């Protein structure tokens, strides 16, 4: 009895020292600083989601040297990064919310260290949202009732500032309003150029409060980190030898001496991010021109922006806590815990693909497709992301659609259908030769549906009026092409072209029904409603295998053995059109569970692959039990997938792993589509 309880006690100690808990789930990757396409750092799942000993990675999986140490009574431990030397703290837990990743570490049984990575989201506040910065909040308290001497350390390497590691980096340091900052940037600034997806222009800043006991240093990684490890303080000096990123790796470091720490937390906050004057090269109404970062209308220069963001931390923390609660509660109320596990993981990923640009009187949101070729303003990537924008603040719909309208209304796009994208981020030059990736039916439907969804939620019928000529041009294309779709790509272009796609046809037909609504809202003659009604009747005759048990829509007309997710009927509910018969929703709800695999319903019969954004579109318009099946499977996937980078939307529904062609769709903003349930009109 005594011996076995002793053994149990030892086992419990060992396991508590080894395992971290994960709340609400263990994600494929943990967002660390994810605020824009260039501030996009993650802890990948191949670390086991254990931060001590692991380098943060850019969304491409490129290492971003970012090192954290803590010293307790003279003993130094590593809490982030893979620099050689000190042993690691023990990670006790990770919790993620919509805006925060919170790690709790045990430091030698003496101190609890809590590190919060906060990337705020401000759906209603352009000034605050326009900054490409994140917070790191580090706080320590005693965990054994004794007092301890505690120093903390944080550095970043120049890897953040250049994807080409042979580029020379320059640096500087300074103070403003009791905020100290370390600045670094490429000597050769190349506006609107990237290397390995990392911006080749702009200034990076690491900042903190200039408390007593704060020290800083810029120098070689081994020198600066070695200085902290041996002396627990830095030298307030900078190396004067400007050099390449990978030449004795310059790092930019701060340390805080927290003094003697007892049982109340002592807290220090850091901010990290990039400032760029011009952010997008855009062919708009008046031709190609550089668009300024929206931040520059609100802050007079880099340092004002850095200081304002840093000093705003108390507001950011409160605002973010409120937004976290709102999203969690709304998700719980809509469909329970599993749904909140999903939505809360996707918020930073979605906003991390957006660049806020322009001026307060003419703001733009530019979207980077991220991993799938990094196209800019791709209409069928905005479309799946759109639910989160409609849920959080529908005005953002206008900011993201405007660049597409302006480019096409300037006459710079020759095709009769809607443009697919505007180029490769950050160059939105459009396609004057009309040679964009053609998805004609898909994008005409998407543009009309998204424009109406925006106008319904904001009452902005003037927007519909202003763009009526383009909208009706696209609607005319749908009149000609939507019922019998030609051989073409849909948004799921990895599956190739197909003729007579059932799901694509219904998008076009709903687009026509939406155009009828737009005509009515703008006092135009509605020639579209009757055509939409006629097409829907005919579609029902072509799209359904009525003899199957249970019956279901097919992937393409007449291919009776095929099936697919009919996710485009979601738009009928998003727009409150009451156009599609309830019997069709019911039929699909009864069918999906019969073809579900372990982690999802396959997208269609060509593969066992699926797309989690479309799973959530289908879930949002399914019966409660089928909805819960979709959601339960996706939450299980999040917690158990073998994929290990920022949430991929494309995976194998049977294995939960990447499809055969690997991690091609990671970190994409389409995951905003998980808000499909919450974007529906109440
Ligand atoms: C996640 O997986 C772990 C290990 O399989 C399990 O213990 C835990 O309950 C799961 N959590 C959720 C939210 O599914
Ligand atoms: C939406 O955002 C705009 C700024 O873009 C703001 O003026 C407006 O108040 C916000 N609306 C809501 C409902 O938060
Ligand atoms: C801030 O100013 C003080 C006083 O001039 C100086 O000692 C310190 O090194 C400065 N900090 C940085 C980060 O440059
Ligand atoms: C070591 O730290 C002490 C303060 O703790 C400081 O006075 C001293 O200058 C430091 N030495 C070096 C070599 O940095
Ligand atoms: C597409 O469907 C229509 C209606 O069933 C049919 O007439 C046409 O032959 C189909 N096209 C092809 C290429 O199969
Ligand atoms: C609508 O149609 C009527 C009759 O065809 C025509 O007189 C009127 O000008 C049209 N209105 C608009 C706004 O096109
Ligand atoms: C497909 O199924 C329908 C009933 O839904 C049937 O009328 C049609 O003949 C079938 N087509 C083929 C090629 O078997
Ligand atoms: C998690 O993954 C393991 C290994 O692939 C599998 O055996 C298990 O069934 C999965 N659990 C869930 C809840 O999907």
Image (tube, grey):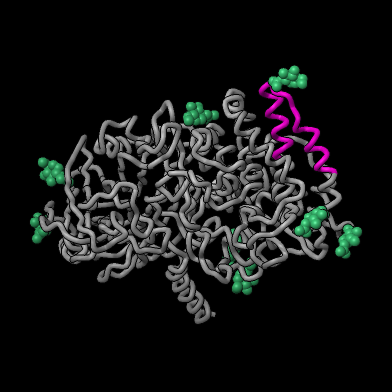
Q: Provide residue 324's location: percent of width, then percent of height.
A: 51, 43
Q: Is residue 330 above or below residue 117?
A: above
Name the quadrant containing residue 573.
Answer: top right
Between 406 and 343, the one nearer to me in the picture = 406
Between 107 and 116, the one nearer to me in the picture = 116
Q: Provide residue 474's location: percent of width, then percent of height.
A: 64, 38
Report if residue 553 is visible in the image.
no
Count of number-bearing discs:
0
Residue extending furthest toward the right = 547
Residue beneath the point at 40% across and 53% down: 40
Q: Is residue 392 magenta?
A: no
Q: Is residue 517 magenta?
A: yes
Left or right: 240 in relation to 129:
left
Prevalent SS, magenta region: helix
Q: Is residue 505 above or below residue 66?
A: above
Range of the magenta residues? 511-537
| The N terminus: image quadrant | bottom right
Left or right: 644 in relation to 84:
right
Residue beneath the point at 47% across and 72% down: 15
Q: Provide residue 462's location: percent of width, then percent of height.
A: 58, 23
Question: Where on the image, by quarter, is ligand 7?
Answer: bottom right
């Amino acid at each position: 009895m005594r011996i076995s309880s002793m053994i149990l006690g030892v086992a419990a100690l060992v396991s508590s020292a080894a395992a971290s808990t994960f709340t609400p789930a263990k994600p494929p990757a943990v967002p660390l600083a994810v605020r824009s396409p260039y501030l996009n750092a993650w802890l990948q799942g191949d670390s086991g989601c254990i931060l001590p000993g692991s380098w943060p990675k850019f969304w491409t999986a490129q290492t971003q040297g970012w090192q954290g140490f803590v010293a307790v009574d003279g003993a130094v431990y590593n809490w982030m990064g893979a620099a050689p030397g000190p042993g690691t703290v023990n990670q006790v837990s990770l919790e993620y919310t919509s805006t925060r990743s919170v790690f709790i570490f045990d430091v030698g049984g003496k101190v609890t260290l809590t590190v919060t990575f906060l990337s705020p989201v401000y759906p209603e506040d352009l000034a605050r949202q326009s900054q490409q910065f994140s917070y790191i909040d580090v706080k320590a308290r005693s965990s054994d009732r004794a007092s301890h001497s505690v120093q903390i350390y944080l550095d970043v390497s120049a890897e953040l500032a250049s994807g080409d590691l042979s580029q020379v980096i320059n640096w500087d340091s300074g103070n403003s309003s009791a905020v100290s900052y370390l600045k670094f940037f490429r000597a050769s600034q190349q506006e609107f150029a990237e290397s390995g997806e990392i911006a080749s222009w702009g200034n990076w800043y690491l900042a903190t409060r200039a408390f007593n006991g704060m020290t800083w240093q810029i120098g070689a990684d081994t020198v600066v980190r070695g200085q902290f490890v041996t002396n627990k303080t830095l030298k307030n000096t900078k190396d004067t030898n400007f050099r390449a990123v990978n030449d004795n790796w310059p790092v930019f470091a701060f340390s805080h001496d927290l003094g003697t720490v007892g049982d109340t937390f002592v807290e220090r906050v850091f901010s990290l991010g990039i400032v760029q004057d011009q952010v997008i090269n855009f062919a708009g109404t008046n031709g190609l021109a550089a668009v300024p970062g929206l931040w520059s209308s609100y802050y007079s220069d880099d340092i004002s922006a850095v200081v304002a963001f840093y000093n705003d931390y108390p507001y950011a923390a409160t605002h973010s806590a409120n937004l976290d609660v709102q999203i969690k509660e709304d998700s719980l109320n809509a469909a329970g815990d599993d749904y909140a596990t999903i939505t809360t993981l996707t918020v930073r990923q979605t906003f991390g693909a957006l660049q806020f640009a322009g001026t307060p009187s003419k703001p733009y949101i530019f979207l980077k497709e991220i991993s799938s070729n990094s196209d800019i303003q791709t209409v069928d990537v905005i479309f799946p992301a759109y639910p989160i924008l409609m849920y959080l603040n529908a005005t953002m719909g206008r900011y993201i659609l405007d660049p597409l309208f302006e480019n096409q209304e300037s006459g710079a796009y020759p095709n009769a259908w809607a443009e697919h994208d505007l180029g490769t981020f950050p160059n939105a030059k459009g396609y004057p030769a009309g040679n964009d990736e053609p998805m004609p039916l898909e994008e005409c439907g998407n543009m009309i549906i998204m424009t109406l969804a925006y106008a319904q939620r904001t009452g902005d019928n003037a927007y519909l009026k202003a763009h009526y000529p383009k909208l009706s041009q696209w609607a005319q294309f749908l009149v000609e092409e939507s019922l019998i779709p030609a051989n073409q790509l849909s948004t799921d272009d990895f599956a190739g072209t197909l003729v007579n796609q059932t799901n694509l046809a219904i998008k076009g037909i709903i687009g026509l029904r939406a155009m009828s609504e737009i005509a009515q809202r703008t006092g135009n003659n509605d020639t579209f409603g009757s055509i939409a009604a006629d097409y829907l009747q005919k579609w029902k005759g072509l799209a359904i295998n009525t003899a199957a048990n249970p019956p279901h829509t097919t992937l393409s007309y007449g291919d009776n053995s095929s099936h697919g997710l009919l996710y485009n009927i979601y738009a009928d509910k998003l727009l409150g059109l009451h156009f599609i018969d309830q019997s069709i929703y019911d039929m699909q709800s009864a069918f999906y569970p019969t073809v579900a695999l372990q982690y999802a319903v396959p997208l269609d019969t060509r593969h066992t692959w699926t797309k989690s954004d479309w799973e959530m579109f289908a879930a949002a318009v399914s019966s409660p039990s089928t909805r819960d099946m979709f959601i339960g499977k996706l939450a299980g996937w999040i917690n158990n997938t073998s994929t290990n980078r920022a949430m991929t939307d494309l995976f194998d529904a049977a294995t939960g792993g990447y499809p055969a062609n690997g991690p091609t769709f990671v970190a994409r903003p389409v995951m905003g589509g998980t808000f499909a349930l919450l974007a529906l009109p109440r």
